[in-house]
Every structure is written in structure tokens, then in C-alpha cells.
Image: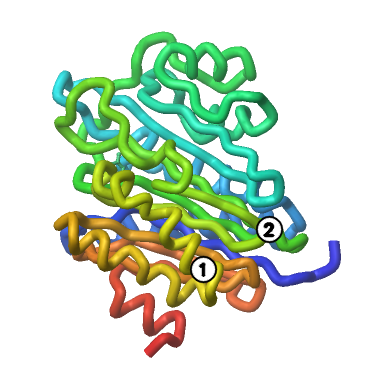
Amino acid sequence: MADRPWSIVVHGGARSIPPEKAEAHRAGCRRAADAGAAVLQAGATAVVAARIAVCVLEDDPTFNAGRGSVPNLAGEIEMDAAIMDGASLGVGAVAAVRHIYNPIEAAAAMLAAEPILLVGPGAEDFARSRGVPCAGLPLAPAPSPGGGHDTVGCVAFDQAGHVAAATSTGGLAGTLPGRVGDAPLPGCGFYADDAVGGVSLSGDGEAIARALLGARVMRAMEEGHAGTAVNAIRAPMQRLAAEAGVIAIDAAGRIGMAHNSDHFAVAFADRNRAAAIAVLHETEWRKEMNHD
Ligand code: GLY
């Protein structure tokens, strides 16, 4: 494929990150963005890039998703993940899964199937039927799981102008078994539409879902730049006294991010900035993105 513009942004969760854990968050986000950037540069689709980047984050126990998932009230992990193809409006999502090493792989396998969301054992049967690797026993929480309001995600824009969004989470620590937050719900924890752009969110899942936060950012992006549209999270989160972080790419491939949490681990890259830049906090990423 010709050398056309592409871009990618990933997040490792909106939360307070202690200084001793900052470098692990930076490095993990950088690795994920680098992995996605490499395939986008080679001409892969946005869906493939977003899936690969989120797999890297799920495999990193630094983050509350996949291997680093936090335990619920029963001491068990239940994971949710979703991916959306902005070209077809295809959605694949799984919720409350306990045996799937990379829940985003199961979600991606669903893009070619009729369902948009499967939960629990049904989702795991589907994953096994599509050859997605699953453990025989439920996966155990990591020895020192990510914690806080993590959740990971990616939005990618490929050389053909297609957008994809992906989100994956271990949920919130100590919640009731069976609890599902925003991450696998379209318009809440993720959305993608080539005509507008794509979003992935992290934070208080119940508040994000109540506010339809992903849909609000998409609506704002219809009017303009991803960099300003992301501020649509601020008023609803203030109203609900909740925390969130969002990453976005608009239909022109421009990147935006915002959060009202103490920190938000993010990394981004594009054709002109192929080395992924990894940053943690608004003051840092605004500088990196020349928004100051
Ligand atoms: N934002 C992830 C969750 O609340 O489950």
C-alpha cells in the first residue's frame, strides 16, 4: 500500500499511578502503541492494529485487563472486552469471561459472526469454537494485580482511512460477581464509525454507561477535532462525581485524549511520529502533542 497517513493511540487506564509504577505504565503503553504502529505502517487494517495493541496490554500484568485483572468480591477475575470496526459498524464483545487468556481475541473473532455481545460460559464456548486459546481452569488474579480504575484500550486509523476501537478490562476490584461495566457496551466504553472516528474509555464503568460517555464524545467529534471533542467527558463526569479517561481519533486521523483522574497512561504514534510517545498525565501529553 502507498505510504498514506495512519495513527494510533492506546491507554492503560485512568487512575492514580504511584511514582514507582509510572515507568511500567509508560513502557507498557509504548510497547502496545509500537506493536500497533508497526502493522499500520506495513498497511494492516485498523482492526488488526487495535487487536494487536490491546493483546500486548492484556499480556502485561501492569494493567487491569487480561493477566493483570483484579479480583471481584469472590476473589475471582471476570473480564470484559470489545472491538468495533468503523468501516462495517461490526461489533464483537465478551463479558464476565474467566478462562480466555486474551478476551480481545474472542471479541475480534465475533466481528465476523452475528452476535455483538456474549457473556460468561456462552462467550467462552464461542471463543473455543473459533480457536481462541482458553485455560482449562478459571484464570487466577495476578499476584499484584493492576488495581484502581485501569482498563486498557486502543483507537487506530489505517492507511485506507478506516477506524477501529478496542477496550478490555478486569472490571473494578471487589465488585459483585457478574457485574459488568461500560467496557463491552457500544457507545459507553467504545465506539467506531469511519464517518466520525473512534473512542475507547476507562474509569467508573457505571457512571460511564449512565452518561453514554462514548456516544457523547462521538457526537462532539461530528462537529470537529478529536482533540476538543474529548472534553465532552468533563461535565457528565463532574455531575456524577465520577472519574474517566478517553482516547479518540477523528475521521481525519487526528488524535485526542482527556481525563479527570489523577493520571492517564497513554501512548500515541502516527506516520510522522512513528516512535510511540508514552506519557502519563495531561500536562505531559499536552506538551507532547503541542497543545500548549
Ligand atoms: N471501566 C471499566 C469498568 O468499570 O468495568
Q: Nearer the viewer, mark 1 or mark 2?
A: 1
| Dot 1 beta carbon under 8 Å from ligand 1 | no
Residue topped by disc 2: 40
The residue sitting at 16% across, 19% down in the picture is: 74
Q: What residue type is labelled 1?
A: Met
Q: Which amino acid does label 2 sit on?
A: Leu
The residue sitting at 42% across, 54% down in the picture is: 214
The percent position of residue 258, horizontal first and vertical second, equals 35, 68
Secondary structure type for disc 2: helix
The percent position of residue 291, horizontal first and vertical second, equals 42, 86
**What's the mark number on residue 71?**
none
Q: In which quarter of the image is ligand 1?
A: top left
Alpha carbons under labels 1 and 2: distance apart: 23 Å
Specify the quadrant that holds the N terminus: bottom right
How many numbered marks, from 0 up? 2
Q: In this view, does 246 lie to the left or right of 140?
A: right
* Number of other residues with Cα within 10 Å of mark 1, as a class: few under 14, some 14 to 19, many 20 or more: many
In the rendered view, tell whether residue 254 sits above or below residue 34: below
- N-terminal label among 1 and 2: 2
User: In terms of image quadrants, where is residue 60?
Assistant: top left
The percent position of residue 34, horizontal first and vertical second, equals 55, 59
User: In terms of image quadrants, where is residue 179?
Assistant: top left
